[in-house]
Image: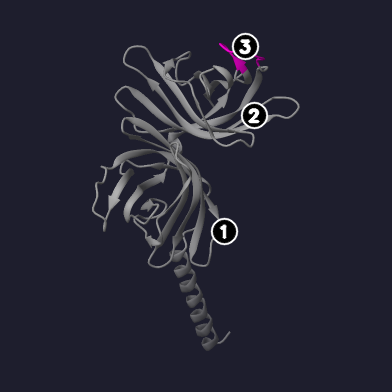
Amino acid sequence: MNSPTKLWTGAIVGVLLTICSIAGAQTPSPAASAVYRLNQKSTYQVGCFPPCLCPISQPTSVRGTFILTPDEGGDVLATYRVTDVNWIFVLRNQEVQVTGSGTYEIGGEPSQQRLQLDLKVGDQPTVHFDSGLVAAGASFPNIVLTISIHGERCFDNVFAVNTSPVPEAEIHPYQLLSGSSFRRGCFPPCACVTGQRQPLSGDFALVDLQPSPLFTEFAVVNTNWLAAAPPVPIPVHGVGFYQVGGEVAVQQELSLELAVEDEPLTHFDSGLVRTKAVFPLINVTISIHGMRCIDTVMVVKAAPK
């Protein structure tokens, strides 16, 4: 190859490398599914925003997790699916759980992002929250932005989302042990037929959350259970929270939003009860109605993998 040909070849390669470099800067490389955890600056606020003049509530802290999974994106923006939203906050001395799913997009030069989530906040109907396309507030994979129903105008509900991937060392895989069970039917004081107890198997994970002075709290993620109920096994999926601790006697509470088969997410809770096993072992019973009359009851016996 003569010198002019070499020069032209080098120039073309240089241009291609530059284009690739720009494309890489515009669209972050997708990673595998990741568990994200809200940081301490995440908040929820409801009330009045400019240009309207009316009262606005003080922001309240939000904690919890979600799953971010790479999806097909466009030429500029990389797209991710957001699933298993599992948040909780305290409003008027009551804990409010938030569940839902949506999408997250990021890319461009300068970097822009958009988070859209369909969220069920407490007992309210599912509502669409959107950040709009805004400047990236942090270096990806960290995410910092606000989402709202009405674009933070007049009366609105606003989440300030400040979140990062959870380090692997802070995700604790668990598996259900023999003795875990699933039962649907009638319980006292009602007099009706009690369903047969079925073995329950599967796994889940606990994710470290900020501990309180008395309790250690975890988010429950990747719940993937199967009740061996003939003729067809019953799948159980969901998210939630687990806490253990106490001032005198050690207590625990398992609170989960679970989808049984194709049914919508339903709240299952053990209540705050004394522990039946020494943590990190878990032995607790959860139900919808406190094991009264027609109910679905699960005995959860689990250990770290």
Marker disc for residue 191? 3
Between disc 1 and disc 3, the foreground one is 3
CB atoms of marks 1 and 3 within 8 Å: no
Asked if 218 appears above or below 51 in the picture, the reply is above
Q: Residue at x 68, y 17 (%)?
A: 196
Query: Which amino acid does the dot numbered 2 rest on?
Result: Leu
**Real-space Cα separation, disc 1 to disc 3, in angstroms:** 54 Å
Q: Seen in the image, is 22 located left or right of residue 57?
A: right
Estimate the x, y position of residue 182 in percent, counting from the top left.
62, 22
Give me the C-alpha separation between circle 2 and circle 3: 28 Å
Q: Which residue is mark 2?
A: 226
Q: Examine the image and state in which quarter residue 181 appears.
A: top right
Q: Which mark is residue 72?
A: 1
Q: Is residue 223 left or right of residue 235?
A: left
The span shown in magenta is 186-194
Magenta span has 187?
Answer: yes
Q: Nearer the viewer, mark 2 or mark 3?
A: 3
